[in-house]
Image (spheres, rainbow, N blue to C red):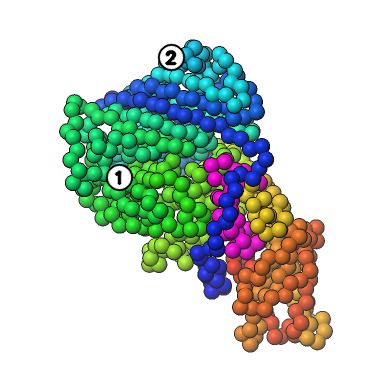
Amino acid sequence: MKKLVAVFFCFLPFLQQANAQQNPNPGYWQQHADYSMDVKMDVKKFTYTGKQAVAYTNNSPDTLRKVFYHLYFNAFQPNSDMDALLMSIPDPDSRMVDTKEIRGRKIHESRINKLKESEIGFLKIKNLTQDGVEVENNVVGTVMEVTLKTPLAPKQTTVLDMTFEGQVPQMIRRAGRNSKEGVALSMAQWFPKLAEYDFEGWQTEQYLGREFHSVWSDFDVKITLDKDYIVGGTGILQNNNEIGFGYEDEGVKVPAVKGKTRTWHFKAANVLDFTWAADPNYIHDIYDGPNGVKLHFLYKNNPAIVENWKKLQPITAQLMDFFNKNVGDYPYSQYSVIQGGDGGMEYSMCTLITGERNYASLVGVTAHELAHSWFQHTLATNETKHEWMDEGFTTFISDLAMLQILPKEDLEDNNPFASTYKSYYNMVARNIQEPLTTHADHYLTNRAYSISAYSRGSIFLTQLAYIIGWDNMMTTLKEFYSQYKFTHPTPNDFKRTAERITGANLDWYLTDWTMTNNTIDYAVLFVEEIQKNQSVVTLKRIGRAGMPLDILVTYQDGSMETFYVPYTSMMWNKPNQYIEYERTILEGWGWAQPDYKFIIPKPKNTIKSILIDPSQFMADVNQENNVYHNE
């Protein structure tokens, strides 16, 4: 069986580049924002002040009378919604709680609830104007509602100016000060950020620590802080000659810094966010990536980790090359891997990751966060509602990359998707699954969210490869990226891309896998010899979800052949994935029919075994009944 699983990985690298045509949906539109920010950071008090001007362009067909901002740092306060969720969910994020056992029962205490006034996070807005005229605002938790003085008509631009004050919270989740690994500042989701307005309206959910949805924006950001701090993050540094960032080893003489501070000036075009990190003890390396991309690595000058971070650099270039070839070209000129945060989190043109890991773990987290650049930060689906598309697709392609790039002795399994299926089966067995249409913040358990977003989302692709064939699926992935990059596509856009590539009807699959808890369970019931040289095989669909079936028959003499049972809802037959074996295409099996029979034109005593899905990519929840052995 493992031999047949391995057959699928022979398709790497996958096919030719798909033709590009930007977003084929008629009438598509998206908003745009141009940010200019000047920020001054007090590294001793962990407070900062900022001036922000945003030119906001309304490309929608609607006249907007209000706009909304996210104030994410307000979540890091006692009694916030994030704090409340930590106290109510049965399995809160272990990074955000302290756990103790009382009389055999685990009690979770929110770390946010314990923050002192000088340790909380906040954003306070001052002097907010629209085109120079003061406007009213109302802050509720992490969302600010702004009533415009002048409604913003379609195809018009307005300028929103403000000053703001912020405090960096103690490191609780993703962003904060003084991480466990000693990174001073992890500045993610740190500024007043315009909420997304799209075809579904305003996206203004409170921040609870999971996913995001953002406006495509250009950023011009100046950050002034203590001169001893090294800064890395989103965008391209504009004042290299003043800062000397990356020039230290190239013999370039950098002017001495006058005074106690220096200003870092970054610009980034067509990105979703602006993130940065800073520490006085960073090592900064630059490595040449594919297509002229500069790869930046910023990590603590800790002798215990330096070797792994040096080894990581050529591997990161190989990972980027793999994603370029199998999804599409990375669209920016730089990418930074930065030690910071509390685990691993993707941001525009950079990631913050914890760096005190073994080598395989360091490569793994980098592979995953880098892969997000293609899905969340170039395709940019609404991951608050379709988190499985971002996290799942990222998990799929990064796992595939690890198989090709990391030495086999560092891999846990030659099947890179084994753990995703194991997690999904475990979730089903525990009866905690929820539909993938569940909002990312509203899962009943963190475990169900995590398995759904990462594992079940990844299985969506591997199982689609089982349904339409691996080459068709990978062509679909590349075509999807080519046509929908920078356009916030939906699950239906991906489904329609696969349908255009193959001609198959796939609405049944998108519906069953993402909108229901239906499971797949097929069984070989029995084999009967009805007459000489003819055996009848009876199959049963036990689960509520239907599927086409690949069936492998092995004979006593060691020979094999396959039978393919089409699923009638598809109105299409997939190409033969087992080209080394003879294949028979049988009549279709419709969802309403619980049983199915087919004939093998050989005596029963010549049959050794019959196996449903030798690839193991169909997520059948009970594989014990998938096989028949002729004892």
- Badge 1 is on which residue? 298
Q: In which quarter of the image is residue 222?
A: top left
Q: Which mark is residue 184?
A: none
Q: Which residue is drawn at 18% across and 26% down?
A: 259
Neighbour class for label 1 at 10 Å: few (<14), some, many (≥20)? many
Q: Is the magenta stretch mostly helix, strand or loop?
A: helix
Which of pointers 2 and 1 lies earlier in the amino acid sequence? 2
Q: In this view, does 417 lie to the left or right of 232?
A: right
Q: Does residue 487 sit above or below 566 in this rendering?
A: above
Q: Name the residue under label 2.
A: 127
Residue 602 x, y percent position in the rendering: 74, 84
Task: Tell me where residue 162 sits by quadrant.
Answer: top left
Q: Position of residue 85 (x, y in %)?
A: 51, 33
Is residue 487 located in the magenta-colored stretch of the structure?
yes
Q: At x 47% / y 38%, what residue is drawn?
A: 271
* Location of residue 249 in the rendering, given as x and y in whole percent from the top left corner: 21, 48
Q: Which of the image's four quarters has the C terminus?
A: bottom right
* One can see residue 243 in this view: yes
Q: Residue furthest top?
A: 134
Side (left or right) of 239 relative to 488: left
Label 1 secondary element: strand
Vertical placement of residue 86 versus 625, above or below: above
Taking the spot 72% from the left edge, 55% from the top edge, the residue there is 505
For the record, the magenta segment spans 464-492
Under circle 2, the secondary element is strand
Q: At which x and y percent is residue 550?
A: 67, 69
| Mark 2 neighbour class, 10 Å CA radius: few under 14, some 14 to 19, many 20 or more | few
Above/below status of 575 relative to 474? below
